Every structure is written in C-alpha cells, then in structure tokens.
Image: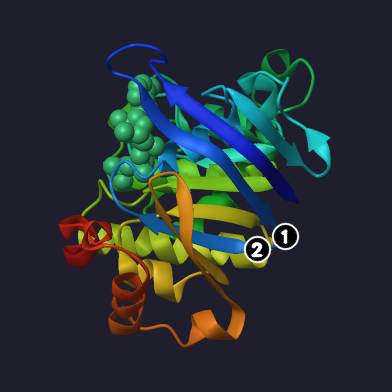
Amino acid sequence: MLRIRNLCKTFHKNTVNEKIVFNGFSLDVQEGDFITIIGSNGAGKSTLLNMISGSIEADDGSVLLKDKDLSDQPEYKRTRSIGRVFQDPTMGTSPSMNIIENLSMAMNKGKKFNFSMGVSKKDIPLFEKLLAPLSLGLEEQLYTKVGLLSGGQRQSLSLLMATLSSPNILLLDEHTAALDPKTSERIIELTEKIVTEQKMTTLMVTHNLNQAISLGNRLLMMHKGEIVLDIRGEEKKKLTIPKLLTYFEKNQSKDLISDRLLFS
Ligand SMILES: Nc1ncnc2c1ncn2[C@@H]1O[C@H](COP(=O)(O)OP(=O)(O)OP(=O)(O)O)[C@@H](O)[C@H]1O
Ligand SMILES: [Mg+2]
C-alpha cells in the first residue's frame, strides 16, 4: 500500500541551525496494516507523516501509495487518498461551518467541483446515522457551527471526516493527546472501530504505550530518524509495557525513554 524509499530531510540546510532529521529512511506498509508509532521527542514522527501527506517536501527519496509516486503531487491532491487527524482538535474541521457542511465537504473530498455540489438534504439521514453511535448528541446539532463544539466533539468529527471518503491511508498524529483521559479513551475506541470495520491502512503516532501496545498489528519505535524497533503479528500481541521497556534498554541508549513515553 505504502512504500517509502530513502527519504532524506534536513531543515535549515547549510546554516548554523541545520538539523538532519532523515537520512535514507525506508518503510513498507501492507494494505490493512494498523501501525502504531512511538518514539522520543524530535525523532521525526510528525515530519514523516508530513512528508507522506505532502505538507513537508522531502529533499530526496520517494513515497509510493498504491504504486503511485506521490513525490510530485502537491498536498491538496494527496488529500484525496490520505486522511489525517492532528493533535489539535481545531485543525480537522472548519469552525465557521455547521456540522452538515463539514461532513458534506468531507464526503465530497476528491470529487470534481465539490464546492458547487454543496449540501444535499438527502445525506442528512446518513450523517445522523454516522453521528449517533458517538453518543455525543451531535446528530441533534447538525446546524451548530463546529467552532462552538468541545474539543472531544470536534476531534470525533475530525475522525469521521478524515475517514468518510475511504482514503487509502489514514495518518493520526497524537490525535488524542490534547483531550482529557475519558474523551481520549472514547476517541481511541472510535478509531479502532472505524479502522477495523473499514480495514483502513493506518499509521498512528502516540506517546501512550498502552495505546501503542493494544492497538494495531504492528508497532514501530523511532529514534533520530530511524526505526529502532519493529514488532508485528503474534509477537506484538504478547507485548507488555515492561517487555517493551526491556527492548528499549537492550537495543538503545537510555535517552530513548522520555518521561512523556513513560508517564503518559
Ligand atoms: N518546520 C520545521 N522547521 C525546522 N525544524 C523542524 C521543522 N519541523 C520539525 N523540525 C525538527 O525536526 C525534528 C523532528 O521533529 P518532529 O516534529 O518530526 O518530531 P516528533 O518525533 O514528531 O516529536 P514529538 O514527539 O515531540 O512530536 C525536530 O528536531 C524538530 O525541531
Ligand atoms: Mg510530533
């Protein structure tokens, strides 16, 4: 599904602030893989997702999605096949538009003339059906401007919107980190439900080791632009936090284990 080859990225090249983040990063993701990604601050997790989605341009290397080279495609074209949810709940939705308008926009993503098609009343029952299982009462607030919703409500909506047009890949970057524990748990349940039901290929960055262990079929640990741990299938099912910590200690230096990783 996704083939990343030899990605290189240096910020502020040839200046005193030069920062080499990736120097030949490669990764293969199979169709239907649900991969959780953990790693120290500054490891390059967000930069990786940004280079896949096109919001940051790689210096070198290639990103192939379904055998199609994305390297020359601008970000707005990639959004047709890539769904994203960010850490900040305000980023995935449009605050001045109501819930129906936001969902319509997401549903028409990738279609030609999607703005002129506007909101269709016939989609309302579908939207109500999508929103009701969230148990957030959103199906009764279809005409409420999204800017007035809570962070958890907005993030639930962002997740629905990111997955509504069945993208080839879903990229989640700490999408529950800004939410309270209960809401975070809810969003995680929703994530698991959507990803499993739609068999969606997913990369999910998290600092929560419990989430990283319990979700998905493969776990990657990144450090300084490299994959330092890659555990999948049966081996992943047997993972526990103490086991994971032993892996870190065996394989890498102590600076891999950040306080955020341990205590989130
Ligand atoms: N736009 C940018 N300009 C300059 N440097 C950047 C930019 N984006 C990222 N970096 C640098 O690249 C490195 C990797 O950052 P990135 O945000 O990908 O890390 P991360 O693994 O997502 O960390 P965190 O867990 O803190 O979110 C960091 O040193 C960061 O300062
Ligand atoms: Mg990040």
At label 1, counting other C-alpha atoms closer than 10 Å, the crowd grade (few under 14, some 14-19, many 20 or more) is few
Q: At x 58% / y 72%, what residue is drawn?
A: 217
Q: Which residue is mark 2?
A: 33
In the rendered view, how is the structure colored? rainbow
Determine whether the beta carbon of the residue marked 2 sits less than 8 angstroms from the nearest atom of ligand 1.
Answer: no
Instruction: Give amino acid for label 1.
Output: Gln
Q: Residue furthest right?
A: 67
Tell me: 209 left or right of 260: right
Residue at 63% over, 26% down: 60
The structure residue drawn at horizontal position 71% and vertical position 48%, both measured from the top left corner, is 2
Q: Is residue 233 visible to the viewer in this orientation of the structure?
A: yes
Decide: marks 2, 1 in contact (CB < 8 A)?
Answer: yes
Horizontal and vertical percent for residue 52?
A: 60, 35
**Residue 59 x/y as whole percent:** 58, 22
Mark 2 surroundings within 10 Å by alpha-carbon count, few (fewer than 14), some (14 through 19), many (20 or more): some
For label 1, being within 8 Å of ligand 1 is answered: no
Q: Tell me if 87 is positioned left or right of 130 in this view.
A: left
Disc assigned to residue 30 = 1
Task: Tell me: 99 left or right of 121.
Answer: left
